[in-house]
Amino acid sequence: QVQLVESGGGLAQAGGSLRLSCAASGCTFSSYVMGWFRQAPGQEREFVAAISRGGGVKDYANSVKGRFTISRDNAKNTVSLQMNSLKSEDTAVYYCAADATVVPGRSYLTYDLWGQGTQVTVSS
């Protein structure tokens, strides 16, 4: 069975930091592009960041560029999202996802595997 398990969500104050982690099992992790998405109440699921299979290519939404950093450790089958300078607008449920494509994509429709989501709440 293929599973993605997220951790690290919680409460933070504006300007603070959180680090989200996602552990994968039941798949060849290095064969997947990995991405992070988020969804606020009443909103569409939106792209946050993605990383190529080897970690050499990263892509970020403009709203988080310069504040968030995506990384992966293929030896440990994990992908992380370091979130700094948090804003209240970052409040959402965050999901990690896996995509069996070569180039990181921004559409959630192309991702095949999803974690359960973890809540991030930023107070102002």
Image (cartoon, rainbow, N blue to C red):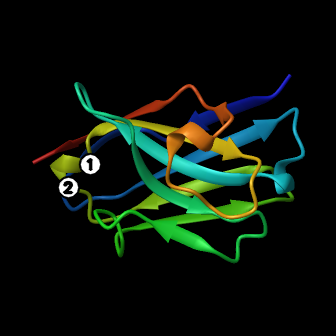
Q: Amino acid at mark 2?
A: Lys
Left or right of residue 93, residue 20 in this image: right
Alpha-carbon distance for marks 2 and 1? 5 Å
Answer above or below: position of 34 versus 44. below
The residue under label 1 is 90
Q: Position of residue 82 (x, y in %)?
A: 47, 61
Q: Position of residue 81 (x, y in %)?
A: 51, 56
Q: Residue at x 21, y 62 (%)?
A: 15
Q: 43 or 3, which lies in front? A: 43
Q: 97 or 24, which lies in front? A: 97
Q: Residue at x 74, y 54 (%)?
A: 101
Q: Residues within 10 Å of mark 1 (few under 14, many from 20)?
A: many
Q: Position of residue 96 (x, y in %)?
A: 57, 42
Which of the labelled discs sits on residue 87, or is there none? 2
Question: Cβ–Cβ below 8 Å for labels 2 and 1?
Answer: yes
Q: Secondary structure at mark 2?
A: loop
Res 120 seen here: no
Q: Position of residue 12 (x, y in %)?
A: 27, 46
Q: Amino acid at mark 1?
A: Asp
Q: Residues within 10 Å of mark 2 (few under 14, many from 20)?
A: many
Q: Residue at x 66, y 52 (%)?
A: 34
Q: Secondary structure at mark 1?
A: helix
Left or right of residue 39, residue 116 in this image: right
Most extreme residue toward the left is: 124
Where, by quadrant of the figure, is residue 58 drawn?
A: bottom right
Q: 3 or 16, which lies in front? A: 3
What is the quadrant of the N terminus in the image?
top right
Answer above or below: position of 22 versus 71. above
Where, by quadrant of the figure, is residue 43 drawn?
A: top left
Left or right of residue 38, residue 58 in this image: right
Q: Residue at x 46, y 44 (%)?
A: 37
